Structures are given as structure tokens and as C-alpha cells.
Image: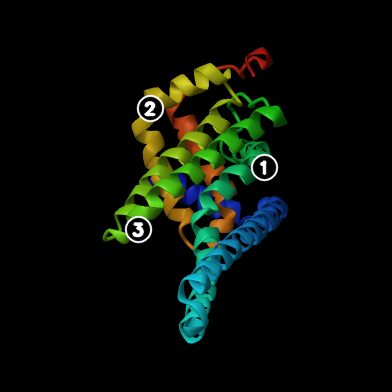
Amino acid sequence: MLNAAIKALFQIFSRPFQAVLLKSIGLALILIALIGVVLHRLLISLADIAERWAGGALGPAGDIPLAIFAKVLSVAAALGIVAGSVLLMPAVAALVASFFADTVAIEVERSHYPADPVGVPLPLVRALIEGVETALLAVGVYLVALPFLLFAGLGALIFFLATAFLLGREYFQLAAMRHHPPAEAKRLRKAHQGSVFLGGMIIAAFVSIPILSLATPLFGMALMVHVHKRLAPAQLAPRAMEGA
């Protein structure tokens, strides 16, 4: 697994990957910016509601405390936007991966497995379904783990393990479905869930690194192509398109 991670890390920054890396980073930044705008509007709205409630409860005597309260809410909103954008990075990575999965997989297979059968590109709709499903699950995990962040990092641990499971699941299935029908790809993932989860933990660690996390879609996909090649019989023919 470590060897696969090293291969993936070096390859995503190689010359053949430069164009797709820039596109992936650009799309991730756009999505993060959109998330930031949505969070900003949501938190400002909640702050306004809280400020009006406090103003009505305290009356004219509460002008100074209310001003301090408004300043605290403003700072909390700014921190919430930053924290929310960072914690939702796994969801962003899952969605971005659906656009570049085949480009990455083709280059990894061409470079490292030239003698093996070539995978069949996934229909964009199928890839998007996988990406959107994982992104929504990641958002759900974020909301569940958020209250536990107050308890000695328990929320962070929950979030990390759930991220490892979700991203390992998605990237492995995207790699496997290039060679198997979706049902068979999922069966293969379940049969090797320990290895897939370990790979997911490496991806989760990668996505937790600021700046570098923008390259997660490439790294995750490249890693799971190697993992799939190790787990699946090399002689398998490409999947039938009817199974997509």
C-alpha cells in the first residue's frame, strides 16, 4: 500500500498530469468558493436573527453588550466559513474526482500496466452519480461529527475514519468499474474492504493537508488504480458496457 501511495504521489506531479492537475485544482477552488458564499450567507442570517433576538430581550440598556455580541458573532461567522470550507474538502474532492477519474486512470494504467487489458471509460453520468452520492454522504458525516468536536477531538476522529471509508469506497469503485460492471465492482470492494479502507485512510490523510488537499482527486484515483490492480485478477477483460 505504501508503495502504491508513493507511486501515485510522484505521478500526479509529473508532466503528463500537469494539465489535469490544474483543471482539478481550478474546479476544486470554484466549488470551495461557492461553499464559502453559501456558508457566509447562512451564518450571517443566523447572526442577524440572534442579534435581533438579543436586542429585543435586552432593550435600550443592552446597546454595549449587544455591540460586543455582534462583534463576537462576526468573528465566529468568519471562523465558521473557514472551518466549514476545510471540513467539506472531502465532499469537494469526491465531486471533482468524478470529472477526472478516467483521465487519471488511463495515464496510470498506461504508465504502470501497459500489458494489462485497458479499462473502459466510465459514462459521465455514472461517475457523477458516484461523486454526488459520496459528496452528500460526506456532508452528512460532517454534520453528525460537528457536535463531537467539542469532546477531546472525538469528532475529528469520527470525521477522519468516515472520510477514509467514503473516499476509499468511491475511488476504488471508480477504478474498478472501468474493468467490471458496477455490481461486480462493489462486490470486489466488499471482499477487500480492509485493503480499500487502508487506502482510504491514506487518502483521508492526504485531504487533511492544506493546499496539497486540492490534488486529492488525482492522488486518490491514482492510488486506487494501483490497489485495484493488486486485488483484481490481471487477466480480467474490460467490463461490459451493459453493466454500467
- The answer to whether marks 1 and 3 mark residues whose Cβ atoms lie closer than 8 Å is no
Q: What's under tag 1, amino acid-wise?
A: Phe
Quadrant containing the N terminus is: top left
Q: Sequence order check: which comes first, mark 1 or mark 3?
A: 1
Label 1: element kind: helix
Q: What's under tag 2, amino acid-wise?
A: His
The label shown at residue 129 is none
Residue 243, visible in the rendered structure: yes
- The answer to whether marks 1 and 2 mark residues whose Cβ atoms lie closer than 8 Å is no
Q: Residues within 10 Å of mark 1 (few under 14, many from 20)?
A: some
Q: Sequence order check: which comes first, mark 2 or mark 3?
A: 3
In the picture of the structure, the residue carrying the numbered disc 3 is 149
Most foreground residue, 235 or 194: 194
Relative image position of residue 53 (x, y in whole percent): 51, 67
Q: Sequence order check: which comes first, mark 1 or mark 2?
A: 1
The label shown at residue 100 is 1
Q: Quadrant of residue 82?
A: bottom right
In the picture of the structure, the residue carrying the numbered disc 2 is 192
Q: Residue furthest left?
A: 152
Per the model, the C-alpha gap separating discs 2 and 3 is: 31 Å
